[in-house]
Image (tube, rainbow, N blue to C red):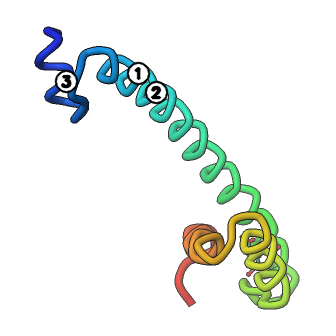
């Protein structure tokens, strides 16, 4: 790719900055792949718990546990952590 093309793609104003951005974006893409893999693993583990509880006659959802999960993310990441945890819970147990 030419320097000007790379600069165009990254929004950088010089080739040096464009290279920093391109390299860091590769790392972000690799991190996102790992995050997606972890989310999928979390979904599978959550399904094991839900199936065990439903199989025993219980309910899919356990709100007191969900409050703990929400608190964990909020403590680590602040208010947006709560939104992230809500999305994870929706992915893991569906909408309620
Ligand atoms: C996995 C569980 O079941 C459900 C899914 C949860 C989760 O994915 O973290 C949390 C609480 C439950 O609503 C559990 O009770 O731990």
Q: CA distance from mark 2 to mark 3?
A: 14 Å
Considering the image in quadrants, where does the C terminus appear? bottom right
For image coordinates 19% across by 30% down, the residue present is: 9
Q: Quadrant of residue 17?
A: top left
**Label 3: how many Cα within 10 Å (few below 14, some 14–19, many 20+):** many
Mark drawn on residue 91: none
* Residue 47 drawn above or below residue 5: below
The spot of residue 29 in percent (x, y) is 45, 33
Considering the image in quadrants, where does the N terminus appear? top left
Q: Earlier in the sequence, mark 1 or mark 3?
A: 3
Which residue is at the front of the view, 67 or 5? Answer: 5
Q: Which residue is mark 1?
A: 20
- Disc 2 element: helix
In the visual, does 83 lie left or right of 26? right
The spot of residue 46 in percent (x, y) is 74, 65
- Disc 3 element: helix
Please name which of the two marks, 2 or 3, marks the residue nearer to the observer.
Answer: 3
> Do labels 1 and 2 touch, CB within 8 Å?
yes
**Label 1: how many Cα within 10 Å (few below 14, some 14–19, many 20+):** few
**Label 2: how many Cα within 10 Å (few below 14, some 14–19, many 20+):** few
For ligand 1, give the image quadrant.
bottom right
Q: Quadrant of residue 63?
A: bottom right
Mark drawn on residue 7: 3
> Do labels 1 and 3 touch, CB within 8 Å?
no
Q: Residue furthest top?
A: 2
Q: CA distance from mark 1 to mark 3?
A: 11 Å
In the visual, does 32 lie left or right of 48? left
Q: Earlier in the sequence, mark 2 or mark 3?
A: 3
The spot of residue 37 in percent (x, y) is 60, 42
For image coordinates 19% across by 24% down, the residue present is: 7
Q: Which residue is mark 2?
A: 24
């Amino acid at each position: 790719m030419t320097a000007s093309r790379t600069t165009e793609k990254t929004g950088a104003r010089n080739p040096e900055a464009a290279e920093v951005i391109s390299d860091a974006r590769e790392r972000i893409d690799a991190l996102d792949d790992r995050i997606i893999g972890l989310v999928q693993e979390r979904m599978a583990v959550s399904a094991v718990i839900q199936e065990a509880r439903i199989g025993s006659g219980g309910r899919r959802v356990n709100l007191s546990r969900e409050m703990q999960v929400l608190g964990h993310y909020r403590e680590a990441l602040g208010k947006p952590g709560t939104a992230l945890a809500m999305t994870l819970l929706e992915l893991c147990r569906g909408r309620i």
